[in-house]
Amino acid sequence: MPGQSLPIQTALMPAYYKDFHCIMGACQDNCCDDGWRIEFSKKDYLTIKRAPKSTEMEELMKLGMRRLREKEHDGMYAEFHVTDAGRCAFHTPEGLCRLQLECGEQCLPKVCRIYPRREVYTPAALEYSLSPSCEGVLSLLWDLTDGIDFIEEPLPPSKCKLALTKNPVETNFAAIRELWVDALQARGLPLPRRLTLLGLLTHQLQSLDWEDEAAVDHWLTVSGSLVRDPSALADQLGRMSGNRNMFLSNNLQLLIRQFKTLGPDLAEELLRVITDKQTLAEVDLDRVTINAGRYQESEAKLAELTGGSEHFFENLLVTITLFLSFPDVKTPEELWQSYVNLCNLYGFYRFAAVCAMDREISRERLFYVLVHVSRSLIHNPTQRSRLRNELFQNGSATLAHMAILVGG
Ligand code: SF4
């Protein structure tokens, strides 16, 4: 089928998007002090270089900003120096940005101006989303007990454009994305079952002939009815259940693979909850004893904190779906990969949240851990792809295995 041009004339955003504000001094892990590389484009670099500034700032600039080899940094041209303590060189002890104070907000690189926001064109709209790696965002998600609503607004002519789609599935991206969100918000089912329902429907779509427009339309109609009333799938959903030991073992492996990106201190804290080991060096995956009883105790503590409500994790999943532009509908393989990614992320978020409660039952503790998980996975596509590819390589990317990943 020849490509089809779709006019993009609307902006789509979660209704809470406009409520976001940085919580500044109340933030436990200020994004300017967390050891992140702050890389930016040549345009941003030149804006900073050319801005009028004091001699003191010129001197600080020599130490605080350096050029990069663009090829090795995804086209990024320069970065701010981050100290050994993980602080941006321009961050003052009072938590302010020296560059912004002296040269104005317009002088900041785009990444500093927009974080934790993201704007991207999809075949549906210009989409605005917020990253769950920011405590201010998690705090908003916590308060949305009725779930996330979306708003659509017309785009100004200067932002309208054409999206070229390659197949009927991509042309139906807006409807498929809506179905994903509806499945995640199908509150008649427990959250893990919603993910399994989503897996069943995604698997059906993956198996269709993507050039067959009528088949794709039919799938959309039938899937919409099943999301509204999943009773016809009760048998299939019932057959796919969780397996606590496999869930814990899988997440222990993920934890070990993320030791560096998560931060060794936090990773070892979580390790001590789930195993009889104190440090990574002591762990032999073939011999380690998993402490399922302690995990279960922590699970009860998380339920105490959330009052048994699943709304926070539901909101987190919807936010991840939007932020990562899931589902990926370029090919059937990429569609399934995006589902596997979502399950992998949910399983690990859930695991880390439960382990976090071992030390302290509080929202602050939950947010602290989930911010670090997000920074380790959501903002680290290489790591995310590596973990997902491992599942494919060892034959663990099946629907049945995903039910285990999300059901623990
Ligand atoms: S992580 Fe979010 S809340 Fe914290 S300082 Fe950065 S923008 Fe503000």
Image: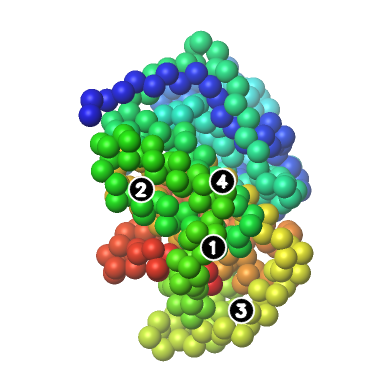
Colouring mode (rainbow / by chain / secondary structure / one colour):
rainbow
| Mark 4 close to ligand 1, CB under 8 Å | no
> Alpha-carbon distance for marks 2 and 1?
18 Å
The residue drawn where x is 68% and y is 37% is: 16
* In this view, 154 is above or below 322: above
Residue 147 point in image, percent of width and height: 68, 46
Residue 264 point in image, percent of width and height: 52, 67
User: What is the three-letter code of the residue carrying label 1?
Assistant: Arg
The residue drawn where x is 50% and y is 59% is: 232
**Which secondary structure lies at badge 2?**
helix
**Which secondary structure lies at badge 3?**
helix
View extreme (left): residue: 1
Q: Nearer the viewer, residue 308 or 270?
A: 308
Instruction: Residue 384: tell me if it is visible.
Output: no
In the picture, the disc for residue 205 is: 2
Observer-side mark, 3 or 1, equals: 1
The answer to which of marks 2 and 1 sits earlier in the sequence is: 1
Query: Is disc 3 in contact with disc 1, using a CB cutoff of under 8 Å?
Result: no
In the picture, the disc for residue 193 is: 1
**Which secondary structure lies at badge 4?**
helix
User: What is the three-letter code of the residue carrying label 4?
Assistant: Asp
> Alpha-carbon distance for marks 4 and 1?
13 Å
- Is disc 2 surrounded by few (<14), some (14 to 19) or many (20+) residues within 10 Å? many
Label 3, on which residue? 295
Question: In the picture, residue 210 is in which quadrant?
Answer: top left
